[in-house]
Amino acid sequence: MHSGSLKLYASCIILVAIVIRLFTNRYKQGLANIPGPTIAKYSSLWKLHNVWKGNHHQTALDLHRKRGSLVRIGPNHISVGDPSAIPIIYGFNTGFMKTAFFPILSISWNKKPQMNLFSTRDEAYHRQQKRIVANSYSISSLLELESSVDSCTEVFTSQLSKFATKGTPIDLGSWLQYYAFDVIGEITFAKKLGFLEQGCDIDGMMQAIKGMLVYASLCGQIPKIHKVLLGNPLLTRFMPSMESWNQVLQFTLKAVNSVASLKRDGDKINAYQGEDTGGKDMMSCWMAVHRDDPEKLSVRDIIVHLSANVFVGAATTAIALRATLDFLLRDSRIMDKVRGEIDAAVLTRRVGNPISYRESLAHLPYMTAVIKEALRLHPSTGLIIEREVPQPGATICGKYVPGGTIVGINAWVVNRNAQIFHDPDVFIPERWLESTSEKLMEMEQTIFTFGAGPRACVGKNVSFIEMHKILPQLLREFEVRLNSPKELKVRNIWFVQQEGLICDLVKR
């Protein structure tokens, strides 16, 4: 057979194999009749392209409103839009495991990926580590550090006063993220990270995290791609310097070594040098556990948990702060109501200066409702939180879904469920104050902003404390106005980030 004929024959074989694979995908047993975009049923490229466009949260909303509770967004991917499925997919001991999307969001250290509480697929490791560190994320533990948060607030308002005095516009969205980073620094390392003092993106961390999120959101749609890119174990073996590119890891190690001393033993950092300071910050608490029992919590574990705080903590809180402020600035009725509540609480001395977390909860109920409504309408994550259906399958929304199928709920979809929330796309804080107790419980159980079940966001209390403290304090001290009526630029890179919150400030 001539070489030309061989090439033609090989091409035909490849083409037939591709066609067979596409049709196998399309008519996969148990998924063939679930509605969704036609191309998505054949190939994951539809999902990859849609995520690349940066507006998948809006696409998901549109698809579910047109096609119902179950939407097929890939050959083996089902987006679920019914809140009744939350306990089925994310509840305790359901057997639904995290997927290959999550390990992409982990640091590389000592020539291999290091899983954190969020990224690990190992449920036993997650349970063991969470039992050790979860107390540090409790409200009671975090409030022991409230004075440190207040010190960040003092620097924040001092810096904003300079803009107000000069009458120059400020990118308040960036400054809110500087604030969130320095709070994370105080809670995690007992030191500010320098964002507020310098008024800039220290070590390019904000841009680095954005780049990592873009990579993870795209590779996560076809996780096999990661194995030949940054997840390729050969890269760190033949290019040891690659780990120095991981800015989150390097930033974490820099912060650790500025307040502690780590001893290197061979290729591993495995010992802590220094006395127990009795500090309440997370690193001090976890180092104390390590000193008592190094096997229970290794230094490797500690670095992994600390770096996760740096990677996730500031970005998600900044999104929530920007969203809340943006909603307020675009509705003068609600803003006037919030200001009136804050002023009345100040006048009657029900709140101190700065406003404490417990004072905010107890005496600013409308502010609390505003925060809840903002978190409902603009959750930080904008893709489905993936889980793999266990064998032999499960019934979801009345439909049998085969084992091995990847399913998940997008917070943007269930948080705007019209059957649960009247006028779901409208910012109505009053719904959290005027609803019956039964309706309030139904809404609370539907909200998916921080996930649900044993793998829900462990750091949500950090965000709650920051929001309840800094937002009323900001509105107490400043008249904040949008510099331009233009809508914020929003891009979904798994975190639904905003840009362009340019404001004018007037000292009150």
Image (spheres, rainbow, N blue to C red):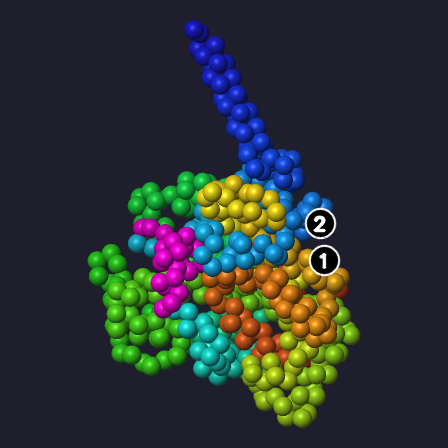
Residue 117 colored in magenta in the image:
yes
**Could you say where residue 454 lies in the image, as x and y percent from the top left?**
47, 62
Who is closer to the viewer here, 39 or 391? Answer: 391
- Residue 199 vertical placement versus 203 (above, below): below
- Amino acid at pointer 2: Arg
* Numbered disc 1: secondary structure: loop
Q: Is residue 13 magenta?
A: no
The one of 506 and 335 positioned closer to us in this rendering = 335
Span of residues in magenta:
111-132
Quarter of the image where one finds residue 6: top left
Q: Relative to 182, is 82 on the left or the right? A: right
Quadrant where the C terminus sits is bottom right
Residue type marked 1: Ala
**Which quadrant: the N terminus?**
top left
Decide: few, some or many residues near mark 2? Use Cα within 10 Å; few <14, some 14-19, many ≥20: some
Task: Let me know if residue 219 appears in the view.
Answer: no
Q: Which mark is residue 418?
A: 1
**341 horizontally vs 274: left or right:** right
Q: Give residue 440's mark.
A: none
Q: Pointers 1 and 2 in contact (CB under 8 A)? A: yes
Question: Could you say where residue 301 lies in the image, as x and y percent from the top left?
Answer: 34, 62
Q: Determine whether the residue tagged by mark 2 lies in a helix, strand or loop.
A: helix
Report the residue marked by disc 2: 65
Please identify the residue farthest to the top as the structure is shown: 1
At which x and y percent is residue 77?
55, 43
